[in-house]
Amino acid sequence: MKRYVKTIFKIVEKDLILELKSKEVINSMLIFSLLVVIVFSFIFEPGAEYKDEIAAGILWMAITFSGVLGLNKSMINEINGGNLNALLLAPVDRSAIFFGKVFSNFLFLILMELMTVPIFMVFYNINLFEKQIIGTLLVFILGSYGFSVLGTLFSLISVKSKTRELMLPLLLLPLLVPIILASIQSLNIFYFSGTFENAFKWLKLIGVFDIVFTCVIYIIFDFVVEE
């Protein structure tokens, strides 16, 4: 178990060091998410009240599509450098390699959100953390982890395809619908009422989604890599 955790940590450390040098993944994700946020902010009339009801949807749309872009760039870097083949040949559990990539992508996504969300709140004149800080943070953490688990798997599957830019969203987005929907609903509930009771069923859905796919991918990952 200690070796398993150490393998995950080393892969995350490698990805963070490489990203600090190039800043390619974070920058592309951040620029794209900010473009979505800023462009959609111009569709609202000044002082429009209905923007509060759809703001969470716009935010998660920005997170989702910038996340897909980041997944593509992250996995292409692994393929181009030959890093992925070297990792798969290493005498370690292959699922540890997978979860190392999952946590790397999760950290990149969280870093992007940390920079995007404050700008989003300024442009849309709303405070997502006004009534429920812990619940709102939980939505971002659970939602981002679920995105990273499925996104890492399908980016591995699609990265060698000639149409990988198209293939990844086609494979990933339909399966992400429950987590995106639950995240949007949870954010809306926390913003308007701030109560855990109303949001619990949506948070539970995200949590079950994360656990189920983590377990399933842990079991089948060796077969996916072999194919």
Image (cartoon, rainbow, N blue to C red):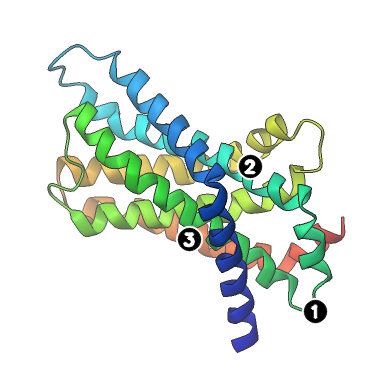
Marker count (numbered): 3
- The quarter of the picture where residue 185 lies is top left
Above-or-below relation of 215 to 162: below
**Residue located farthest toward the bottom when viewing the structure as drawn:** 2
Please tell me how crowded label 2 is: few (under 14), some (14-19), or many (20+) other residues with Cα within 10 Å.
Answer: some
- Circles 1 and 3 in contact, beta carbons < 8 Å: no
Nearest to the observer: residue 170 or residue 33: 33
Can you tell which of label 1 and label 3 is closer to the viewer? 1
What type is the residue that disc 2 sits on? Lys
**Where is mark 2, residue-wise?**
73
Which callout, 1 or 3, points at the residue further toward the start of the chain? Answer: 1
- Residue 92 x %, y %: 75, 78
The label shown at residue 225 is: none
Q: Nearer the viewer, mark 3 or mark 2?
A: 2
Report how far apart the C-alphas of labels 3 and 2 lie in the structure: 28 Å
**Type of amino acid under label 3:** Val
The secondary element bearing badge 2 is classed as helix
Residue at (82, 60) in percent of width and height: 85
Which of pointers 3 and 2 lies earlier in the amino acid sequence?
A: 2
Residue at x 68%, y 68% (from the top left corner): 97
Which residue does the numbered mark 1 point to in the structure image?
Answer: 91
Q: Amino acid at mark 1?
A: Pro
What secondary structure is found at the residue carrying circle 1?
Answer: loop
- Specify whether residue 211 is in view: yes
Give the percent coordinates (x, y) of residue 6: 60, 80
Q: What residue is pinned by disc 3?
A: 208
Front-most of residues 49 and 185:
49
Is the residue 195 above or below the residue 61 in the image? Answer: below
Q: Measure how far apart labels 1 and 3 are at the Cα level.
A: 32 Å
The first of marks 1 and 2 along the sequence is 2
For mark 3, does the 10 Å Cα neighbourhood hold few (<14), some (14 to 19), or many (20 or more) residues?
some
